[in-house]
Image: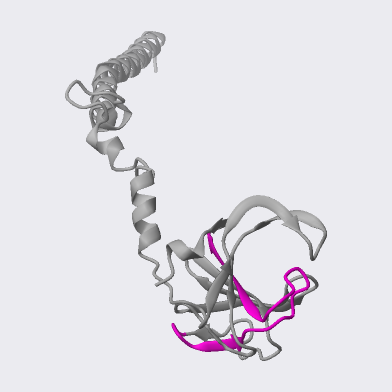
Amino acid sequence: MTKKTHIIYSLISICALLAYGGFIVKNAMHEVDTVEETLPYEKEEELVEIEELEMETEPLIQVVSPQNNVPEVIAEHLPEEPVTEEASVEALTEFSPLFPTTGTVTKYFSLSHTYNPDTGDWRAHSGIDIEALPAEAVISVEDGVVTACYTDPLWGNVIEISHGEYTSIYKNLSTLIMVKEGDSVSRGEKISGAGSSSVTESGKTHLHFEIMHYSEYIDPLELLG
């Protein structure tokens, strides 16, 4: 191969390399342009998704609407209105217990403190006393469950029965206890007899009877049927 021919081949090789390099640079620039062209489109899609999300959540974050003080979406999750005093009185009259024993009321309900000669102190009378014959039947005033059955140092033999919102309490009972804690009892079922086991109320045989509405003592005579 002559020197002239060698030079020609060298020039052809150099030209081929330059052409290939230009091709690579052109493709790279094209890819950059493609990325720049797609970025705005992707950002536009993100903006559309954010706007749709705001439209979906708008009713939930609204606090006050012009038409109503509380939006319907929030109103569905608000707590119920508190029970009014009128509703409480109506609920109270729905409980109509039987008279717990046969006899005459000799001492009435009073939350005022009066002197008790048997104990030598001043105390309220949170129930009524019903004078009765010894072992006169004492009945459950309403369907319920016996929640306590015990002997108290002052009140003697005691039975407590839950009737839901109400609790009936029978004190100064005889030793004849016919139920135990956990028993279900029916309205009018005999549970014990009138006695004289209490040291706070000496005298004739009688039943000391109380009713509580939740944790508050109420006058049994307002309810007894």
Of 218 and 182, nearer the camera is 218
Q: Which residues are magenta?
A: 186-213
Q: Is residue 185 visible?
A: yes
Residue in the image at 78% along x and 72% along y: 199
Q: Give the vertical position of 17 relative to 108 (above or below).
A: above
Of 189 and 202, nearer the camera is 202
Of 104 and 168, nearer the camera is 104
| On-image quarter of the N terminus | top left
User: Residue 43, image x and y in percent?
Assistant: 29, 20
**The quarter of the displayed image where residue 195 is located:** bottom right
User: Residue 200, image x and y in percent?
Assistant: 76, 68
Indicate whether residue 91 is drawn in magenta. no
Q: Give the vertical position of 178 relative to 157 (above or below).
A: below
Residue in the image at 47% along x and 77% along y: 141
User: Residue 129, image x and y in percent?
Assistant: 60, 70
Residue 60 falls left or right of residue 119: left
Residue 69 falls left or right of residue 124: left
Indicate whether residue 197 is drawn in magenta. yes
